[in-house]
Amino acid sequence: MTTLLLLGAGKIGALIATLLAETKEYDIHLADVDPEAIKRIRHDRFPVIHPVILDASDSQALSCYVSEHKVEAIVSSLPYYCNPAVARVARDMGLHYFDLTEDVQVTEQVKTISAGSAQAFVPQCGLAPGFISIVANALMSHFESVETVKMRVGALPVNPSNVLKYSLTWSTDGLINEYGNICYGIEQGVKTPLLPLEGYETIEVDGLLYEAFNTSGGLGTLADTYAGKVQTMNYKTLRYPGHCEKIHFLMNELKLNQQRDVLKRILENAIPKTLQDVVLIYVAVIGRIDGELMEENYVKKIYPQRIAGKTWSAIQVTTAAGLCSVLDVVLTNPAAYQGFITQETFPLSTILANRFGTYFA
């Protein structure tokens, strides 16, 4: 069995632990600094899950733990700002490393830390960035030349009931980070910074109207990989119409982007959570095939699922399955993956054929 240390027993970490435990091929040390989070984990059903109270910000304690328990890989489902310190421990201790970060600067730090490592460092696992990058890369491979790549993802309540038409389905820190940080895309073949909450457009899928706008991080490393090879590439978040205008008011006109702790308290106090959500994945690629201008699309809706006797939201399922499929592929053949590994490294066919990738199929 492969021994993992999984940091963070929250919404996503709990499902990652469950999915891996169901295989009976991973020995999972599930760590969190919050005793209440540990108590919520139904580890009694899975003897391969070992709950532990551990402060991941204490690098010395973290290093001692992985050494004592012969851990082979660290998986971080912590907030993005915790990941550089965790990556350094993984590098120093000779461990494989996986995370869910959407933060561009954190990913750059992980890339620097991983230089020369004999182990795999795979940040940005999950949905967006993550699976969306794998899909876009697969579609682009069908073309002789690519002109435009549009990547759109939304995690939305099925039955919105508030003025934002939104529910908190994942990390509030991550959500605010996406709404407030500089975005990157490709324009006229050049990697270009873009303003968040701009680039507004509408899109219709299955007869329903959505709005889309720039958010940070969802493109992953694709802008670096395809700069000079693609004319236009961008990532936008999907929401129900009206959401962007209200978030723009909160973050820019009320200047809460400069007081993110205040905005976090407001959102978590006023916006409910839900397990009744839908994840919408949309990728469109336009380019030349046999000299003709063609378009190819990938569109999928994913809903909550029952796993191990419990209902998990669509965003939990897609994010956890994205990480678990990549992790499973890497740790099945670890010698093939060394140093910094981008999401577009993984063929879509390999991910969908994986036992965890079937949740996208």
Image: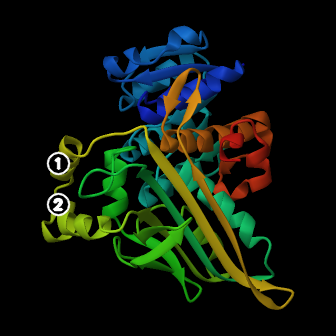
Among the two numbered marks 1 and 2 on one chain, the one whose residue lies closer to the N terminus = 2
Question: Which residue: 25% across, 52% down?
Answer: 162
Instruction: Answer left or right for 30 relative to 323.
Output: left
Question: Which residue: 49% across, 19% down?
Answer: 65
Question: Which residue: 83% across, 91% down?
Answer: 291
Q: Is residue 294 above or below residue 81?
A: below
Type of amino acid at the residue the image marks with label 2: Leu
| SS for callout 1 | helix
**Residue 246 placed where, x, y %?**
23, 66
Instruction: Answer left or right for 258 relative to 355.
Output: left
Instruction: Answer left or right for 294 relative to 302.
Output: right
- Cβ atoms under marks 1 and 2 closer than 8 Å: yes
What is the CA distance from the residue labelled 1 to the residue labelled 2?
Answer: 10 Å
Q: Is residue 48 visible?
A: yes
Q: How is the image coloured?
A: rainbow
Residue that mark 1 sits on: 266
